[in-house]
Every structure is written in C-alpha cells, then in structure tokens.
Image (cartoon, helix red, strand yellow):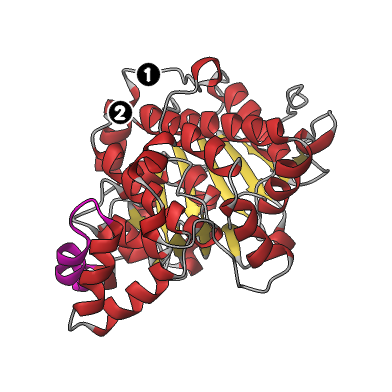
Amino acid sequence: MPRTDSITTTSDDSTRAASATGAGASAVSDNEVLLQRDGPLARIVLNRPNALNALTHGMIRTIAAALTDWADDPAVQTVLLTGSGDRALCAGGDIVSVYRDARTDPDENARFWADEYTLNAQIKRYPKPFVALMDRIVLGGGVGLSGHASHRVVTERTKLGMPETTIGFVPDVGGTYLYSRTPGELGTHLALTAATMTGADAIALGLADSFVESTQLESLADALKRMPAAAAIAEHASTVPPAPLLAERAWIDECYAGNDVATIIDRLQTSSVTAADDAAAAILAKSPTALRVTLESLRRARDLRTLEEVLEQEYRVSLRMVAGHDVIEGIRAQVIDKDRNPAWQPSTLSDVSDADMQAYFAPLGERELRLPRSKTHETRQTTEREATA
C-alpha cells in the first residue's frame, strides 16, 4: 500500500486528515487518522469516535508512515497520541474486518497483523519521545499503540485491558510481553479473565508511567509544544492513587501459579475469596483453546528477551488462531449476532491436547514475521521513563 501523502506543517496548529490510497481493507477513510503539527509537537489523533477509535489496516499504515517521516524530521521533537471523542483512546482492532477477511480474504488478516505488530515494535524503539494519553477505554490494539510508548500517561478514567479471550483469541500486539512482566501472576489473571484495570493499576503493573488528572490533559498537550516531554508530564502529574489489583495479589499469585488452566480454575473455585470464584466463572466462559494457548503464550513470553521476539511469537499464534474455529465464532457471538452464546470447539479444556496447543507456536517457515532489532532503544526508553517518574 502506498504511504501517506507528505505532511504539510504550519506554526498555527493546522490539521490535515491523513489519507492513503489503495483498495480493500488496507485503505483508510478520510479523517480516520488526523496528523497535526504545531512547532516541535507532532500529534496523532485516532478519529473513529463512533467505533471507539478501533484500528483499521489503513490507519495502521498511515500511523507507521507518519512516524517514519517524523523520525527523520529534526523539527519534530515529540510525538503525542490521543483519541477523538469522549469514550476511548482506542478499543482495539476492527474485529468486524477480521471476521469478514477470515471468510473472504484470509491473507489480509496476515497482512494486517504483520503491519500492526511492526508498528508496535516501531513505537517501542522510536528515537523520539512518544507520549500516549491513555484516557478512558484502552483495549487490545489500543494497548499495542500506547503500552510500548516511551511516556505512558493514564488518568482516573482509564479502563485498560486485553479482552481477546472473550472472542476466542489471545492477547497480542505485545500484550503477552507486557502481561508476562507484571508483578506475580496479575498479568495471568487479567489475560485469562479478560478483566480491565484502572490507571493506577496500569502504573503498578508496569503498563503506564505517569498519572495525570483528566482535567489536566489539555494543558499537558499544550505544554508539550513548549517543553520536553518529561518536564511537561512532571509539571502536570498527580500522586498515583492506590492500585486495587495490588490488594488482590495474594490470592491471585496463589491461584494462578503453574502452567495448567484446569488447575488454576480448580484453585479459584475452592478459594475462600469471593473474587476468586468470580474469576473462575469468567474463565470458564472463554474458549478452552484460547485459554490454553494464552497461558502458554504468557509463560513463553517470560523467557523471551525482547518485544520483537514476543511479537513474532504472537504472529505465529494469531495466524493459526484465525484459521481455526473459535475466533470467528467468538466474533460472531459478541459482535455480529450478539447472542453472547459462542459454541466453542473443542468445548472443554480436556479436549485441547498438549499437541494441539503446542502446534500454535510452531515456526511458520517462509511466512515468519521478522522484525528489525534495535540495540539502543531499550536503554533510551528506560532512561526517559526514569526521568518522567
């Protein structure tokens, strides 16, 4: 797909809609992504408010092209990611398109994920401060855009999570990288139940860096035009509230230890903690295949050193999951027919064999996703986050 048109810049906060030519799912409709320039600040605005700013393939291509241009532009000092509307930064990928393409153009889903995961890695290693305002709903693909940024800002309204197991899928966009590195088994709990977390939780779990009251976001965005990202965020940051999930860590760590989903469910059901029984019920409603593959993905991700390695693993899993039954059935039940009654196949954990589960992780041969590596980015990003904290 061709890159976006070159971006004209002015000093008066002019805005132009990012457009991309092309056909099919790779095309981006007018105004779905807004690219703004104001002096040293370059801004990406996800602009599908009626769809909670869900990502299309064209949007992903547009954002990646803009980031490439800005990386080489000495006039750009900071990149800011926000979402339009008053409901979400981004609620994830456009799963209706995934459903459609699985039936009519399976290769398009492969292209979508290859470009999306490449963008996730691009954000992770971006050479300039990348500030993500993670206000309100931040789910799935929205976590992929924001959770790997160098400066991740949450608010009292943040509702963040990876809901993929609800549709028979697995956490991706680097979600297994982030969740596998949370304290104890908190990430395992969130992945299997598809539960969301607060902004304070996100900071405690390592998915965000700074807490800013939502009433201060406009002022923060304005400050980013005048000062370095770390200084602007520090000027607007508030004390982080208590993280509710940390108070639950004892029973979560105890119940979610190990590598067997059935054992985890049994521990949850026999726990004296009411929340544990609720978690068991949530897990039991999910696809058995997705549960087993998700847990294995998390355990494997712990042993992988870089985000790129994890994204490459997620790509193998994603292609195989969408070629199976449960993802399409899950999207049908949740989004298409909305009967909320998916018929998973297999229907029980015991019917998902170890061999079946391990097959999702086998190399793809010529279809492997091979992401570029950067040796310097991890050091840069860690230094910037320490400066922001």
Residue sitting nearer the eye, 50 or 6: 50
Residue matched to label 1: 374
Q: Position of residue 31 (x, y in %)?
A: 79, 46
> Separation of disc 2 and disc 1 at Cα?
8 Å
* Above-or-below relation of 146 to 120: below
Which disc number belongs to residue 378?
2
* Magenta extent: 246-260
Q: Amino acid at mark 2?
A: Glu
In the image, residue 78 sits, relative to residue 275, either above or below, namely: above
Number of other residues with Cα within 10 Å of mark 2, as a class: few under 14, some 14 to 19, many 20 or more? some
In the picture provided, is 330 more to the left or to the right than 31?
Answer: left
Q: Of helix, strand and loop, which mostly describes the magenta segment?
A: helix
Residue shown at 24% from the left, 41% from the top: 386
In the rendered view of the protein, which quadrant contains the N terminus? top right
Residue 224: tell me if it is visible: no
Disc 2 to disc 1: CB gap under 8 Å: yes
Element under disc 1: loop
Q: Tell me which corner region of the image, top left, top right, bottom left or bottom right, holds residue 358.
A: top left
User: At which x and y percent is residue 184?
Assistant: 18, 56
Going by the numbered disc 1, the residue's amino acid type is Ser
Asked if residue 19 lies left or right of residue 93, the reply is: right
Picture quadrant of residue 39: top right
Q: Is residue 256 magenta?
A: yes
Q: Residue visible at 65% across and 29% down?
A: 111
* Secondary-structure class at tag 2: helix
